[in-house]
Amino acid sequence: MVNTKRRTKAFVDREVQGALAWRLARQWVLFVFAAAAMVLALQWMSNPFAPIRENLVEAWWTHAPVLLVLVCLAPVFAFDAIKLSNRFTGPIHRLRLATRALADGQAPGHVEFRGADFWQDLASDFNRVAEKVAAGNAEPAATGSGAAPAAGKATDA
C-alpha cells in the first residue's frame, strides 16, 4: 500500500538537502560568472579596439535580460531540486527511524513510502526483514525455554 499523504516539510533531512542546496547555489553562481566572462570576451572580440568601458556597457545592454531571467529562475530551480530531493531523503529518513526502532528492540511498524517516492522496493524489503526479526524474537517464547531448537536453525554450540 502506498502512502498518498502529501509531505508538509520542505526539508526532511537538513544535512543532505542543505548540502544539495548549497551545491546547487555554488554551481549557479559559477555558471553566471562563466557566462558573464564568455559574454565579455565575445563582446571584446567583436570590437577589440573600442575602450573597455564601451564594451562593458554594450555587453550589459545586450545581455542583461538573460541575466535577469537567470536570477528569476534560480529560486525556481532551487525549490524544484529540494522538492525532488524529498523523494529520496523522505524514504531514507523513514527507514532510518524504523531501523533505529528495530535496533532498540521495538516493533517498527509497517514502513510505506509516498507514491512518488524513490526506492519503493526498499520499504517492502525492510518490512520483510522486520517481520522475520519479529518472528525470530517470538519463536523462543512460543517453543518454551527447554525446547530443542527448530530444524535448520543455528545453535550457540
Image: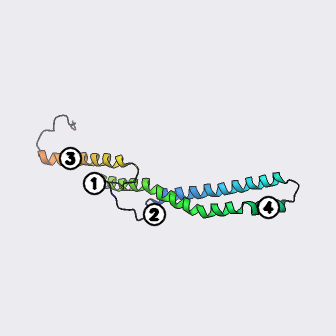
- Mark toward the start of the polypeptide (4 vs 3): 4
Local secondary structure at mark 2: loop
Q: Quadrant of the C terminus?
A: top left
Q: Name the residue under label 4.
A: 58
Query: Of tags 3 and 1, which is closer to the observer?
Result: 1
Residue 22 horizontal side relative to residue 108, left or right: right
Tag 1–tag 2 contact (CB < 8 Å): no
Residue at x-position 35% and y-position 54%: 113
Amino acid bearing label 1:
His
Local secondary structure at mark 1: loop
Label ID, residue 135: 3
Residue 100 horizontal side relative to residue 20, left or right: left
Give the percent coordinates (x, y) of residue 67.
67, 61
Query: Of tags 1 and 4, which is closer to the observer?
Result: 4
Q: Work out how far the residue at label 1 is from the one at label 2, CA to CA, in angstroms.
A: 24 Å
Label ID, residue 10: 2
Q: Work out how far the residue at label 4 is from the one at label 2, CA to CA, in angstroms.
A: 41 Å
Q: Work out how far the residue at label 4 is from the one at label 3, CA to CA, in angstroms.
A: 75 Å
Residue at x-position 82% and y-position 51%: 45
Q: Mark 1 points at which residue?
A: 110
Residue at x-position 54% and y-position 58%: 21
Query: Of tags 3 and 2, which is closer to the observer?
Result: 2
Label ID, residue 17: none
Amino acid bearing label 2:
Ala
